[in-house]
Image: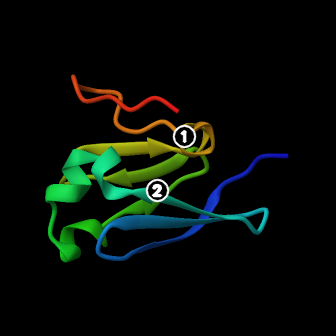
Amino acid sequence: MSISATEVKFDKNSMWVTLSDGRTIGVPLAWYPRLLAATAKEREAFTISPMGLHWEKLDEDISIAGLLAGRGDMTGKNTQAA
């Protein structure tokens, strides 16, 4: 079974991703510095693909596999490990 995102929402501190299998995953925005620093409008400008989420303007890509594994931003010094 391939699990993909169906919906993405944000609150003040978190990103909430609804998955095709019915689960909803919440992760802190602090895990993704580009999203944390973005405006609400910039956060809402994403696309959903079979593999994950993409923000063109923010140059941010988040895989569903990474979300399920509890991984945050893996591009810099401030990487998060689960």
Local crowd at mark 1 within 10 Å, few (<14), some, or many (≥20)? some
User: Could you tell me the amino acid type at mark 1?
Assistant: Gly
Q: Secondary structure at mark 2?
A: strand
Name the residue tied to disc 2: 27
Question: Going by the image, does 68 lie left or right of 73?
Answer: right
Q: Position of residue 74 (x, y in %)?
A: 35, 28
The one nearer the camera, 41 or 49, is 41
| Above-or-below relation of 56 to 68 | below
Question: Going by the image, does 57 lie left or right of 27?
Answer: left
Q: Position of residue 24 (x, y in %)?
A: 64, 67
The residue located at (23%, 25%) in the rendering is 76
| Above-or-below relation of 11 to 56 | below
The residue located at (27%, 67%) in the rendering is 43
The residue located at (32%, 67%) in the rendering is 13
Of pointers 2 and 1, the one earlier in the residue sequence: 2
Give the Cα distance between marks 2 and 1: 8 Å
Judged from this view, the residue extending furthest toward the top is 77
Q: Position of residue 26 (x, y in %)?
A: 52, 62
| Above-or-below relation of 74 to 14 | above
Question: Going by the image, does 28 lie left or right of 23?
Answer: left
| Residue 5, quarter of picture | bottom right
User: Could you tell me the amino acid type at mark 2?
Assistant: Val
**Res 70 label:** 1
Q: Position of residue 81 (x, y in %)?
A: 46, 29
